[in-house]
Image: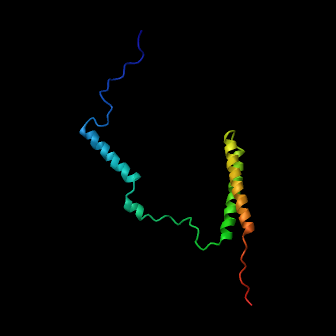
Amino acid sequence: MIKPTPNPPQAESTSPYESLDSKKLHDAAERALDHYLKPSAAAVRFHKPSSMFQVVPDMDNESLLVHACESLASASIMTSDIAAYVESPQRQTILAIQQIIMLAELAVNRVLDNVEISQPAAHS
């Protein structure tokens, strides 16, 4: 019987350290990965987070709650829309996420109902 493919070449070893040069290449690769994936302690210490989406510290609670409620309502509508386009079991997962969002929205609405709105003092 004739074999359709030849035998693969015999490899002596698959170690990455076959020679001194391969050890140097491995060390260089590790240094490069560490440079990009493990920032130095000094870089981490002086990292200033972005303030692009920062909430101002003096924002009143009612405004924050209203914004959170509107965001949750939007997320609920988006998940409902997405659920209409997918099949089970992903649909059940998305609808479960929507239910969690709706429960959070109900909680935020209750807090809004309980918040006493402070009226500015009237000037005489």
**Residue 1 or residue 45, whichever sits in front:** 45
Left or right side of 54 for 111: right
Query: Residue shown at 41%/51% (left/top)?
Result: 37
Does residue 13 sit above or below 99 in this rendering? above
Query: Residue shown at 71%/55% (left/top)?
Result: 103
**Residue 21 or residue 118, whichever sits in front:** 118
Query: Residue shown at 68%/66% (left/top)?
Result: 65
| Rendering coords of residue 3 (x, y %) | 41, 14
Left or right side of 6 for 76: right
| Rendering coords of residue 5 (x, y %) | 41, 18
Query: Extreme front residue here?
Result: 114
Query: Extreme top residue here?
Result: 1
The quarter of the displayed image where residue 60 is located: bottom right
- Which quarter of the rendered picture does the N terminus lie within? top left
The colour scheme is rainbow
Number of callouts = 0
Query: Extreme bottom residue here?
Result: 124
**Residue 103 or residue 79, whichever sits in front:** 103
| Rendering coords of residue 38 (x, y %) | 39, 53
The quarter of the displayed image where residue 92 is located: top right
Does residue 77 sit above or below 23 in this rendering? below
| Rendering coords of residue 99 (x, y %) | 71, 51
Does residue 124 sit above or below 80 in this rendering? below
- Which quarter of the rendered picture does the C terminus lie within? bottom right
